[in-house]
Image: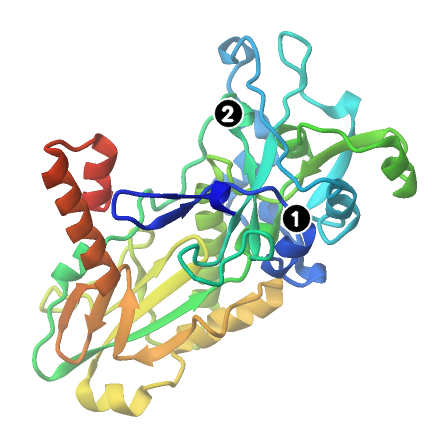
Amino acid sequence: MLDSRECDYVGELLVKDLPLASQQAEPTLPAQELCGSISAEALAAPPAREWIRVPACAIRPRSEWPRRHLRTKVRERPGECPDLIRGPYQPNIISLLPDAALSYGFTGAPLANGIFSMPKEDAASTNFDPLTCVLRLTLNLTPSNKVRRVISGEVRSLPLFSQWLLLELPRHECLALSSGDVVSAFNLFQLPRSWWALFVLAEPISDCLAAELGQGNRRRACVSVIPMGWLSATGLRQHVHGQLVREARALAPSGARLPGMSRTLHATPGADLRLRLWLDAHLDDHLQAECLSREESIKLEDVPSELQVALREVYVDWGVSRSDAKAETRVSLAVACGAQVLSRVGRAMPAAPEIWRLLSLSWHIAAANEASAKELRRGGGL
């Protein structure tokens, strides 16, 4: 157990990558009928659809490929490979290819990638056990990332709690916050078959397992959904989620108050140059903010907005599962973008965990008399 942990500069436990075990990874998946059920190509807007349909658009010329592909490991528990392939992954998340369908480098070696897992649970918990904790499937796509260009999304940075410094509310106004979260978002969106050769795993399956599955000479396992570990995964996931939000905006009732999407669609300010409605849509979550009178905020608390209702309908239509536990509906007190938002007061402050992390980092830098670039970026929230 100790081999799977180490401590950072604040004394917090950091968990290293762990060997994958099928039973521990199953809880992170959506229902089997939803796995890989959404075509990323079909959902994407025309400019992005071309990048998804034709992988050559995002692959470097062979003259820019490394002379030799890096080697990575498939980290799995002994004897787990058959269960990983024949279990819940095989139908729509992991598929099989013959050797002839692989992509080969200058030395004749195939382009192949590693696989490992990371725990979803808190490693600092006294009950944490790497042998029983819930694991998230992740690919080590270093070899494939070396030969590809990055597909960027509309939003190229994560939100910072300092953005809430722009919040201005008169005494008679209140901010109503609504949010939602998609379950196992990376495992929902299927990529075209032309991408699969770039996400092949390093170790082929056995002849016996291939025969059991009726695959013949198809012995090379590959991930067929948008994989975690791919440099373009963030941009594509952000784009297809934005497409779902745009569809919800189009389905909302006529006359509904609809927010502009921050940094993706133009929002129209009011006469006093303030935005009273806005929406942030990121990888697998969204945050909607509405500026209401105090009377409206009390009356509408826990009542879904028109956009929230429409977005839930779109999720159902496309087969997207959402988390009820993480959903908020027009609340006045919430943690959003790393900040504790006190909307009836018209103020926001860093959430307690963020304050303690910043203080710990400052203490660490002061004691060491120097700071690395990584520590400075972390302290600035970059």
Q: Residue at x 12, y 60 (%)?
A: 165
Q: Residue at x 53, y 34 (%)?
A: 51
- Above or below residue 117? Residue 114 is above
Q: Across the whole image, how many numbered discs are drawn on residues?
A: 2
Is 287 displayed left or right of 367 in the figure? right
Q: Amino acid at mark 1?
A: Ala
Q: Position of residue 52 (x, y in %)?
A: 56, 37
Q: Residue at x 70, y 43 (%)?
A: 94
Quarter of the image that includes the C terminus: top left
Nearer to us of marks 1 and 2 is 1
Q: Secondary structure at mark 1?
A: loop
Front-lying residue, 14 or 161: 14
Is 84 displayed left or right of 301 in the figure? right
- Above or below residue 43? Residue 234 is above
> Which residue was labeled with disc 2?
148
Q: Amino acid at mark 2?
A: Arg
Seen as rendered, the residue at the extreme front is 2
Q: Residue at x 88, y 31 (%)?
A: 207
Q: In which quarter of the view is residue 27 placed?
A: bottom right
> Which residue was labeled with disc 1?
21
- Label 2 crowding class (10 Å Cα cut-off): few <14, some 14-19, many 20+? many
Q: In which quarter of the view is residue 164 placed?
A: bottom left
Sequence order check: which comes first, mark 1 or mark 2? 1
